[in-house]
Amino acid sequence: MRSILPKSWIFIVALVLAAPVWAEDSGRIIVTGEGRVTAVPDMAIVRMGVTGQASVAADAMAQVSETMTAVQAVLAEAGIAPRDIQTTSLQLNPRWDNRPRNEGEAPRIVEYFAETGVTVRVRDLAGLGEVLGAVVSDGANQFRGLSFDLAEPDPLMNDARRAAVADARAKAELYAEAAGVTLGALIELREQGAQAPRPMIAEMRMASADMAVPVAEGEMVLSSSVTLIFATE
């Protein structure tokens, strides 16, 4: 007997028949896995600055420029590449005379305060202390922070992800065995979060301007979290 069903009905039936059986009939195991990798930092990030002051604005800026040129020369001598030195701020501000004024007397600028800041990436941690000491002795009079980081975190981050998946699968196998079922195919994998290393604030003690600065870099942690959904048989 010839079918008189519309073609659209036949298409719908085909979709229903093609649907995976486990979508409705099989059980599921949902687990979360965690992966952590520790690493020793291989790069330091130094934030420093130079200040100058004078009664004339141009003189204040000239002081800062001269000192920063000397600081950059020290960094270059220590092997710091130009791409690892970045100017992050440059300011020139007046300092006003705040003493009480007579009526009608205009405000007066006492002097000008100039300031510039740079961020420096130090890739050779063995010489970091000497670099800091030399920079200070050559005129950098502001330290705004020192932190440690990883130059290439992606391979380690992938190791953390692999560890998270392995942890989740091991839990799923354990739960399946305890429940008396067979672990089936992986239905879904979701990354809940991946935490790249945050720059670590360094321990820094300044002994004197002409001495190396002792630092301790410690370790960094990279972590990942995933959720796996398995079918059971």
Image (cartoon, rainbow, N blue to C red):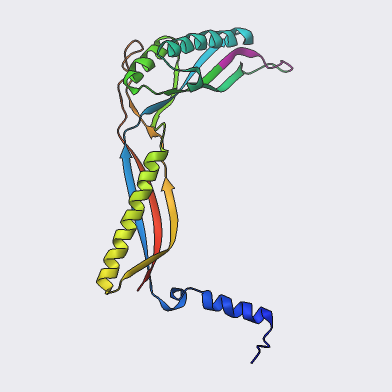
Depth check: give the residue in front, 110 or 120: 120
Q: Is 193 placed above or below 7 here?
A: above
Residue positioned most to the right:
104
- Look at the image and say whether residue 108 sits in the magenta stretch: yes
Left or right of 143? Residue 110 is right
Task: Tell me if residue 98 can be seen.
Answer: no
Q: Is 169 placed above or below 118 here?
A: below
Q: Is 142 placed above or below 175 here?
A: above
Q: Quadrant of the C terminus?
A: bottom left
List x then y, in percent, for residue 1. Answer: 64, 92
List x then y, in percent, for residue 122. Answer: 41, 22
Which corner quadrant of the image does residue 79 belong to? top left
Q: Is 180 placed above or below 6 here?
A: above
Magenta range: 104-114
Which corner quadrant of the image does residue 43 belong to? top left
Depth check: give the residue in front, 128 or 16: 16
- Look at the image and say whether residue 158 sits in the magenta stretch: no
List x then y, in percent, for residue 47. Answer: 46, 24
Tell me what residue is drawn at x 47 percent, y 9 percent: 73
Tell me what residue is drawn at x 61 percent, y 12 percent: 110
List x then y, in percent, for residue 87. Answer: 54, 21
